Amino acid sequence: MKPTDIAKEGTEMTEETEHMIEKNGAKETETVVSAGDAKEMRAVILSGFGGLNKLRVTKKAMPEPQEGEVKIRVKACGLNFLDLMVRQGNIDSPPKTPLVPGFECSGIVEAMGENTKGFEIGDRVMAFVNYNAWAEVVCTPLDYVYNMPDDMTFPEAAAFSMNFVAAYMMLFEVANLREGMSVLVHSAGGGVGQAVAQLCSTIPSVTVFGTASSFKHEAIKDSVTHLFDRNIDYVQEVKKISPEGVDIVLDCLSGENTGKGLGLLRPLGTYILYGSSNMVTGETKSFFSLAKSWWQVEKVNPIKLYEENKVIAGFSLLNLLFKQGRCGKVKTVVEKLFSLYNQKKIKPVVDSLWALEEVKEAMQRIHDRGNIGKLILDVEKSPTPLHHDSPVSNLSLENSWPNQHRLRFLDSTKSDNNEYIFQWHWFLW
C-alpha cells in the first residue's frame, strides 16, 4: 500500500477524543469544563453503540440520592472487557443510549438519601453501580456500597470489586475449590485472571494452569504454576503435565474453548463460563464473529454430562446483584475478601491509571489485550501531555492484531483559559 493510500485510509478512520460537547441549537463547540460546578459534573457519555468515536466526556446534571441511596464523590472507576462489549452493543438486551458506562467505582460518601443507614459523610467506600460509574458523582443503593479497608487506595478498590468478587464466587461458591485441586484460567494476565491466581494461592497445593499472550509471561510467571501462550494448543500442553485434566476451568473466551474446556475436565470437575471475549475482534460489533463464536460452541448433551460426571455452569456477577437480588451473598463475600486483603494474602493488580478524557486510549488498550491487571479511570487525573509546545505530542508505531499496524499521534492545543485539549488520531493499515 502506498503512503498516500495509508494517509487517505487513516484519515477516514481518524477518531478524535472529545473532552466536552456543548450543544447550542444545532451547533456544537468543544470546551473544557472544570469540576467546580456544584450542580453539574463531568461524565463519560456513550452516545450510541459502535466504535471509540461514540465516547466523549461532557457535562451533565449531578444526581441526588433517593431514599436508600448513597451519593459518592468518585475517585476511581474500573474498566472491564465487559465495558468494551457494552460500547459495541455486543451484549444481551443492551440498554438505551445515551448512557454513562461503568459498573464499579470507589470514592467518598458525600450525601445519603432518606432512611439510609450504615454510612457517614466522608466514609471511603467501594461500590457497584448499574451503569453510571464513569462520572465524578454517582448514586447507588446502599446494598451495593462497602466501607473500604483503611490501607486500600481508591485505585485498588476500583480494581478489587468486580474482579475479586467474581473470582472468589466462581472458585469457592460454584466450583468448591479445595486443597489439592487444579484450575485452568484463561486470560491469566487480566484482572480476573490475576485475582484467581492470588485466591488459589490461599489454598494449599492448588495447581494453576494459565493462558496469556506471550509478552505477559515474564510479568505473571510467578502467579501461576504453569503458563501457556494463548495461541498454542493448550489442551495438549495441559495433558502433558496432567493427563487426567483439571478440576476447574474458568472460561472468559467462549467459542471453541467451551468444548476444549469440557474435554479437559476430570470426573466431578466444573467448567464455568463467565465471558465471551472471543466475540470481539474489531472496533465495532461483528456479526460474523458472533456467528462464528456461536457455531464453535459445543452443543452440550445433558446425558453426556451425566455419563462423564461433569458440571457446566455460568456466572454473571452483575446479574446476581442487579437482577437476582443476591446482595447479601455478595456482601458476605466482600467481607471475606477484605479479611484476606488485611492479612496481605491478596492485593489488586493495577495496570495503569487514565484520565476520564483518556477513556478511548484505555479502552483501546484493553481491546488489544495489552493490560496486566486492571485498567483504572482516575477521575481527578488530568490528561498527560508529553510535549506542551509541540503540535505533535506523541508519535508511535505499534503492532496490534497480526498483520495490522497502528500509527498514532497525540495533537494538543490550548483553550482560551490555557487548558490543554488533546486529540488522539489513528492511522490503521
Image (spheres, rainbow, N blue to C red):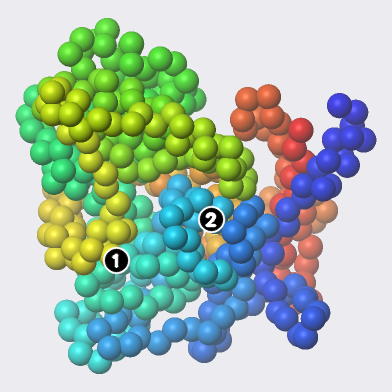
Q: Which residue lies under the disc numbered 1? A: 322
**Where's residue 24, x and y in %?**
76, 85
Whether 311 is drawn above or below 17: the answer is above
Pointers 1 and 2 in contact (C-beta within 8 Å): no
**Where's residue 198, x and y in %?**
23, 37
Q: Secondary structure at mark 1?
A: helix
Residue drawn at x 21%, y 67% is 325
Q: Secondary structure at mark 2?
A: loop
- Within 10 angstroms of label 2, few (less than 14), some, or many (20 or more) residues? many
Depth check: 132 or 233 in front?
233
Depth check: 142 or 91 in front?
91
Whether 19 is drawn above or below 349: the answer is below
Q: Is residue 223 left or right of residue 427?
A: left
Instruction: Kindly indicate the quadrant of the structure image that contains residue 289.
Output: top right
| Quarter of the figure with the N terminus | top right
Residue drawn at x 51%, y 33% is 292
Direction bottom: furthest residue:
114
Report the label total. 2
Whether 90 is drawn above or below 237: the answer is below
| Quarter of the figure with the C terminus | top right
**Where's residue 226, x and y in %?**
29, 19
Residue drawn at x 44%, y 76% is 137
Question: What amino acid type should be assigned to the residue bearing mark 1?
Answer: Phe
Q: Which mark is residue 89?
A: 2
- Mark 1 and mark 2: span between their CA atoms? 19 Å
Q: Is residue 428 left or right of residue 277?
A: right
